[in-house]
Image (spheres, helix red, strand yellow):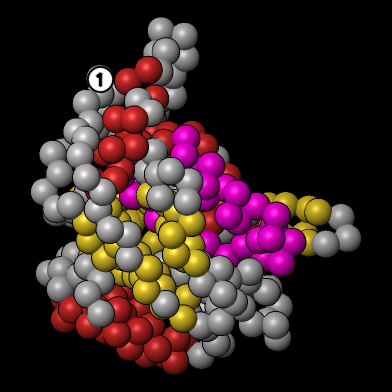
Amino acid sequence: MIVVVLPALGGHFQSHAPTAEPLKVIYFRLALIQLHISAVKSDNLQRACGLIREASAKGAKVVALPECFNSPYGTQYFKEYAEKIPGESTQKLSEVAKECSIYLVGGSIPEEDGGKLYNTCTVFGPDGAILAKHRKIHLFDIDVPGKIQFKESETLSPGDSFSMFDTPYCKVGLGICYDIRFAELAQIYGQKGCQLLIYPGAFNMTTGPAHWELLQRGRAVDNQVYVATVSPARDEKASYIAWGHSTVVNPWGEVIAKAGAEETVIYSDIDLKKLAEIRQQIPILSQKRYDLYGIEMKK
């Protein structure tokens, strides 16, 4: 499925709030790869790279993979599948990003570092160089009686830093799954000039239908940014069943691209002129009362 948003006419954005650099490109194509994850790491890597090449051939300049794209999702799997960074999986991502000359958001993988495990997203530029490494800040520890109990902190350690990277198109902010529930993260990314937020994530059959789209639309409208979420494909036989429905939401809160539950690639043209027009029409960024409240980045 390809969703194309055509640029609208008119408008120029002015704000006293922090903004991104002047727009160099009006719009660019984003691809989200909703990958079916198997228990065989080499198969996951091979299929991911094949779909990345397919997305690039269809004009995508920024491509994103899902959370835990190289391994099943579950506390019982993280140690077994964990890698150093750089390592096998990130080397493959670096190579295919360079081959396709794209910006590649590598979903996430279980990372081992200094005896600790992290849920980590790496980003690679068109030259294959690593541009960012985001360790999931907020660990997924929940207990919904009778439906789902999960505790990432049994095996994972949290990250402690914000992660942004620049492209010729716009600045991009990163979060992983549960990070999207924390509005402060998105607000700070907005303050730092990000116009697109990407969250690889694996919501489940309880939280997915309830909150997946709601949270994305909230983050997009509150900060007048594009929000993209990338889920694994749904596997009814897995111990943890992902909701799927990878999505792109525009700054008006509209869903402009959405997958079903199966393995697929969805596309959306990120229209930065439309973003500027929305910010001009409803100028909340210049209307904030910083004399009364504020969100700050401490690290």
Residue 124 vs residue 290, the one in the foreground: 290
Q: Give the residue furthest to the right.
A: 146
The picture places residue 190, in percent across and down from the top left corner, at: 35, 36
- In the rendered structure, which amino acid carries the disc numbered 1? His
Tell me the residue at 46%/69% (across/down). Answer: 66
The picture places residue 103, in percent across and down from the top left corner, at: 23, 65
In the image, residue 68 sits, relative to residue 57, either above or below, namely above
> In the rendered view, does 164 fall on the left or right side of 229?
left
Residue 210, magenta (yes or no): yes
Res. 14 image quadrant: top left
Tell me the residue at 40%/18% (across/down). Answer: 288
Looking at the rendered structure, the secondary structure element under dot 1 is loop
Tell me the residue at 60%/49% (across/down). Answer: 214
Q: Residues within 10 Å of mark 1 (few under 14, many from 20)?
A: few
Question: For the magenta stretch, what is the residue range?
Answer: 194-222
> In the rendered view, does 178 fall on the left or right side of 100?
right
Tell me the residue at 29%/45% (across/down). Answer: 274
The picture places residue 138, in percent across and down from the top left corner, at: 55, 47
In the image, residue 15 sits, relative to residue 236, either above or below, namely above
Q: Give the residue furthest to the front.
A: 9
Viewer can see residue 216: yes
Viewer can see residue 132: no
Residue 219, magenta (yes or no): yes
Quadrant where the N terminus sits is bottom left
The picture places residue 136, in percent across and down from the top left corner, at: 48, 53
Q: How many marks?
A: 1
Residue at image mark 1: 16
Quadrant where the C terminus sits is top left
Residue 97 vs residue 280, the one in the foreground: 280
